[in-house]
Image: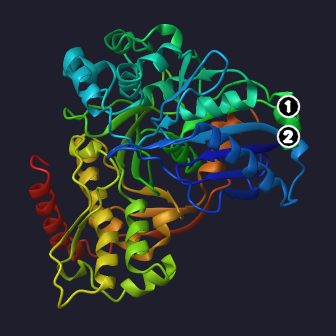
Amino acid sequence: MLLLGIDLGTSAIKVSVVDAHTQQVLATAQYPDTEAPIVSLQTGWAEQDPGQWWHDIKQCILKAHASGAYRPADIGAIGIAYQMHGLVVMDKAGQPLRHSIIWCDSRAVPYGQAAFSAIGQAHSLRTLLNSPGNFTAAKLAWVKEHEPDLYARIDKLMLPGDFIGYQFTGELTTSPAALSEGILWDFSQHQVATEVMNYFGFDASLIPAVQPAFSRHGGLLPSVAAELGLTAGTPVTYKAGDQPNNALSLNVMQPGEVATTAGTSGVIYGVASQVQPDMQSRLNCFAHVNHTATAPRIGLLLCINGCGIMNKMARQWLAPQWSYAAIDEMVASIPAGSEGVTVLPFGNGAERMLNNALPGAQLARLDLNRHGAAHLLRATQEGIAFAFRYGFDIMRSMGMQPQMIRAGKANMFQSQVFTDAFVNCTNTPVELYKTDGATGAALGAGIGAAALQPTDLGKGLELQGIVAPDGQQRYEEAYQRWLTCLQQTVPGT
């Protein structure tokens, strides 16, 4: 059996086709070739068109087919990974009513904060493992207040992956993992969070049918199958947010195991059987893809909104003619610490680990007679690594003490400079593997279709290297400068 994995990212769609028997990737594709736009009508807003997602996914699948590396008819299951926390609202006819309010949109922060206070902070952390924050439930509360006529027409609320699953199958489902990332799941009662629903005044009928992430979420519609050259009835057997799915792709499924990724946003994601939530709710606790009431698997998630997007913008401003590889070679000549230049990368929405502050990206301690573009580019990569260190220290205070972190050799982990800064300032080795989110989604589909067992994960992983700390002190002074700059910018951090 072949498995089709789809990764609905913020910047692009990725697709992989994997052989279930060997776990080898037969073909990959990405679409579009340029980064997908984010609509920002006001400061702190971020939206995308769900219809464009669906168009791009279909084009990406056809692009993968064009490789000729497999027979599309041999695809036996479909898995979907998607950008987390987004809100899609649909009418009774199955049409989205507005653009999706995506993960890095900050407009709902006050709604989540008010809910956190009203429900009770201690109670929220005990039952939801989070504050309602700036997540899907709070986003819907914003729609309810500011777009009441549209809200009245909503038949179902969805996470982005639920919407794509519906486009494939005509069936609408969600999962505890998906609802938990929207802060709509009660871990104490193992059900939809009625207190959150009642506080915001949401009707229970807005929630789709709830079933495990690994399960049949519907069969491929004949019309869609014909358009994509697939077989009608092919099941969608897995849906998960991009970070739990990235963990699955790296075989991070059991307590104590930790994954990281450094794409548009940066994430460290650890699995635990139980957690002591951070009282400030600066890190998020979600149901992992294999979470059950009898065998809890909680995903402890540190998210830094300003990660690869900051690196991309620095390149665009300072060295647009250079490739990322050429920039890496150029900045390698600058010593660790960037000779004093400090960059705070927080310019992509409210930062959860900074108590939902919006400090914007910051550049400090620039000497116009001493520093050049290479210093700024290196300081950008180091500033992102230091943001990881700041959040990682919070994670450690919550009981997560990993001896090794796994990452795909992709995005910023392709940079030797960034990887060196990351492992040294966190003082934790990183194993680098050849994998990505689309491959993880395909493997998840295999588990959901019973073509793979969870214990099979990892058999197809290709280790590409281990990077170990070689001198943490090289970065410690620079990190302390960075931390001082952060504390001056965001009091209380």
Q: What's the residue at 43%, 31% (across, down)?
A: 181
Q: Determine which residue is flagged by label 1.
A: 223
Between marks 2 and 1, how big is the CA–CA gap? 6 Å
Relative side of 385 to 448, left or right = left
Q: Nearer the viewer, residue 475 or 50?
A: 50
Whole-percent x and y of residue 424? Answer: 30, 69
Q: Is residue 296 left or right of residue 15?
A: left
Compared with 218, 59 (above or below) is below
Residue 249 can be seen in this image:
yes
Q: Nearer the viewer, residue 55 or 273?
A: 55
The x and y percentages for residue 165 are: 67, 31
Q: Which residue is mark 2?
A: 227
Neighbourhood count class around disc 2 (C-alpha, 10 Å): few under 14, some 14–19, many 20 upward: few
The residue shown at (50%, 64%) is 411
Secondary structure at numbered mark 2: helix
Quadrant of the frame with the N terminus: top right
Determine whether the residue tagged by mark 1 lies in a helix, strand or loop: helix
Relative depth, front residue between 444 and 210: 210
Say if 71 sits above or below 368 in the image: above
Numbered label attached to residue 458: none
- Whether residue 291 is visible, yes or no, is no
**In the image: residue 121, left or right of residue 217:** left
With 223 as the anchor, is 103 left or right in this view? left
Q: Amino acid at mark 1?
A: Ser
Across and down, in percent, residue 394 comes to 23, 46
Residue drawn at (68%, 35%), measured in percent from left and top? 447
The answer to whether the residue labelled 2 contacts the one labelled 1, judged by CB atoms less than 8 Å apart, is yes
Residue density around tag 1, few if under 14, some if 14–19, many if 20 or more, within 10 Å: few
| Residue at 24% from the left image edge and 17% from the top image edge | 123
Identified by mark 2, the residue type is: Glu
